[in-house]
């Protein structure tokens, strides 16, 4: 097993220097070496050097050899085709526009592609690379780094896994108040401790879980690592591992899988016990997290600002379209939406199949979500909706804090009166306005029904809130194409409507729990 470790901390731009990235690389490299790997550690590399070093590392790998790549330093995401792509930042990076950035940064996709093409060996890519960088502040939508974007497990080969030191769109700490963090990041400390504990299971999944628990402890739950993997076989992060398998808990058994031991739950006929987040078409996985909900300077019903902790869940990437809802109507499980209205309603209008369905009430939304996914389908809670729209950084809009514009959302702003936007747009039209988790149209287009009754916010911390037990109106979120005031499309504004009312401004998207 071979490992390449890179730490970039001494950037040509002095404002970008990182105090601990080089320390992290050296310490992680030593831990990997102690675990029995052949390790190469490189620090403060420019783009040409990064390219040469990574190419040499890949060339030196045997076709079936396991490989580990660790990077500490700056990184960012950029639009790429219909999605977004991640880039590692070399020390000689100097671009001041998004247009020039691609040619001066190292694409993560290039690394994973090269690792996969060299053979069938398993690959682990570890990125402690979401640290707050100054490069994107002048040209990113929010005026600050968004960290890294999600990686689709469907796009990963079955030989590759990727660990992020923090959740998508979030910024990882370079240090901390704990004395252990004077010279190393929380993630590096956690990784080294997990690798160094010879008494613990060296399996990839077990090491990852120890890292997550330790990072959360060191950061007081402000940072949570994430992983994306589609591995066909187990991956061990130590060649010191004993050939004897540890005992399984009662009700499980060890079986041979390509000469490796895999723990299975015999009660569930071969389901792996620690499954990665399931890839659900059309939905985005939102990791568990804690955030501050509400707006101290907003309307009375946006206060008090309170801390909310949510379990992991899935949410539709886009608002439900006319085409998708029409399938439910055809099968007799959904009611026909309102139509007409001088073209403001999308139902029955040619060429609007990919627009959000509107003219639907709260009950229509619930019925559709249940029809599509069975009893696990539902409307999102109000807290889930706000977290998916803003993440944990307190932003005012899904894209950040920049003022709303026609580039970012479908609304009537800029014309001085409502309705001049001419109605909705096809879902996903405003890619620049995506939320921190990659959800489309969380502001504008249609206001979205959520599951909660409208009511006052609680005081203090709450976990997985579901809103009041009863009320006179349901909550609508996100503003719509009718809105012309910036505050009306903020992530904290709370609209409301009678559950049986249908309007041209109202639509929905679905959610479900992460199992």
Image (tube, rainbow, N blue to C red):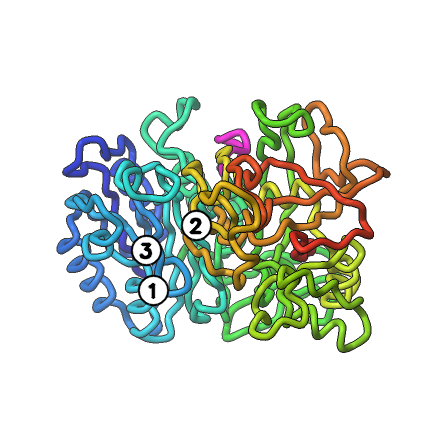
Q: Mark 1 or mark 3: which comes first in sequence?
A: 3
Lateral position of residue 174 relative to residue 505, left or right = left
Q: Mark 1 or mark 2: which comes first in sequence?
A: 1
Lateral position of residue 265 relative to residue 409, left or right = right
Could you tell me how far apart the alpha carbons at marks 1 and 3 are, in whole angstroms?
A: 10 Å
Q: Secondary structure at mark 2?
A: loop
Residue 197 shows in this picture = no
Question: Is 486 one of the magenta-colored residues?
Answer: no
Residue 157 shows in this picture = yes
Dot 3 surroundings within 10 Å: few (below 14), some, or many (20 or more)? Answer: many
Location of mark 1 (residue): 112
User: Can you give x and y, in whole percent of width and height, for residue 101 in the image?
Assistant: 23, 52
Q: Secondary structure at mark 1?
A: helix
The front one of 218 and 270 is: 218
Image position of 39 with respect to 479: above or below: below
Q: Quadrant of residue 178?
A: top left
Lateral position of residue 389 relative to residue 472, left or right = left
Location of mark 2 (residue): 406
- Residue segment shown in magenta: 216-223
User: Can you give x and y, in whole percent of width and height, for residue 287 in the image?
Assistant: 57, 48
User: Can you give x and y, in whole percent of width and height, for residue 299 in the image?
Assistant: 63, 27
User: Can you give x and y, in whole percent of width and height, for residue 380 in the image?
Assistant: 69, 50
Could you tell me how far apart the alpha carbons at marks 1 and 2 are, in whole angstroms?
A: 36 Å
Image position of 444 with respect to 108: above or below: above
Quadrant where the C terminus sits is: bottom right
Q: Residue at x 77, y 43 (%)?
A: 474
Q: Residue at x 55, y 38 (%)?
A: 490
Quadrant where the N terminus sits is: bottom left
């Amino acid at each position: 097993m071979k490992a390449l470790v890179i730490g970039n901390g001494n950037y040509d731009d002095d404002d970008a220097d990182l105090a601990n990235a080089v320390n992290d690389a050296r310490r992680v490299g030593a831990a990997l070496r102690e675990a029995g790997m052949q390790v190469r550690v490189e620090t403060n590399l420019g783009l040409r050097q990064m390219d040469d070093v990574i190419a040499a590392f890949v060339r030196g790998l045997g076709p079936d050899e396991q490989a580990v790549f660790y990077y500490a330093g700056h990184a960012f995401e950029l639009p790429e085709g219909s999605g977004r792509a991640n880039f590692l930042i070399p020390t000689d990076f100097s671009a001041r526009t998004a247009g020039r950035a691609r040619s001066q940064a190292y694409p993560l996709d290039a690394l994973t592609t090269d690792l996969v093409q060299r053979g069938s060996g398993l690959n682990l890519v570890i990125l402690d690379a979401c640290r707050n960088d100054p490069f994107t502040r002048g040209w990113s939508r929010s005026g600050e780094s968004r960290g890294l974007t999600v990686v689709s497990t469907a796009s990963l080969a079955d030989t590759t896994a990727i660990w992020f030191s923090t959740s998508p769109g979030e910024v990882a700490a370079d240090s901390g108040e704990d004395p252990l963090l004077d010279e190393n990041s929380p993630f590096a400390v956690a990784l080294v401790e997990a690798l160094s504990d010879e008494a613990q299971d060296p399996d990839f999944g077990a090491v990852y879980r120890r890292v997550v628990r330790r990072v959360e402890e060191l950061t007081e739950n402000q940072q949570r690592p994430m992983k994306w993997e589609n591995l066909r076989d187990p991956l061990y992060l130590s060649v010191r591992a004993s050939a004897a398998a540890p005992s399984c808990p009662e009700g499980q058994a060890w079986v041979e899988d390509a000469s490796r031991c895999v723990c299975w739950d015999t009660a569930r006929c071969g389901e792996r016990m620690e499954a990665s987040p399931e890839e659900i078409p059309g939905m985005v996985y939102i990791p568990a997290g804690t955030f501050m909900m509400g707006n101290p300077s907003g309307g009375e019903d946006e206060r008090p600002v309170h801390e909310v902790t949510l379990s992991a869940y899935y949410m539709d990437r886009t608002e439900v379209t006319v085409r998708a809802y029409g399938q439910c109507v055809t099968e007799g499980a959904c009611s026909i939406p309102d139509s007409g209205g001088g073209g403001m309603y999308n139902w029955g209008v040619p060429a609007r199949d990919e627009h959000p369905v509107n003219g639907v009430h709260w009950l229509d939304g619930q019925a559709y979500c249940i029809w599509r996914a069975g009893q696990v389908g539902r409307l999102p809670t109000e807290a889930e909706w706000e977290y998916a729209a803003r993440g944990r950084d307190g932003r005012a809009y899904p894209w950040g804090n920049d003022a709303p514009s026609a580039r970012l959302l479908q609304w009537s702003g800029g014309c001085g009166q409502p309705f001049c936007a001419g109605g909705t747009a096809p879902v996903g039209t405003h890619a620049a306005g995506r939320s921190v988790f990659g959800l489309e149209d969380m502001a504008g287009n249609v206001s979205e029904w959520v599951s909660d009754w409208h009511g006052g916010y609680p005081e203090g911390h709450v976990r997985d809130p579901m809103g009041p037990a009863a009320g006179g109106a349901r909550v609508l979120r996100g503003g719509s194409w009718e809105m012309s005031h910036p505050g009306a499309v903020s992530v904290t504004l709370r609209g409301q409507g009678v559950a049986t009312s249908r309007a041209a401004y109202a639509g929905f998207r679905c959610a479900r729990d992460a199992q």
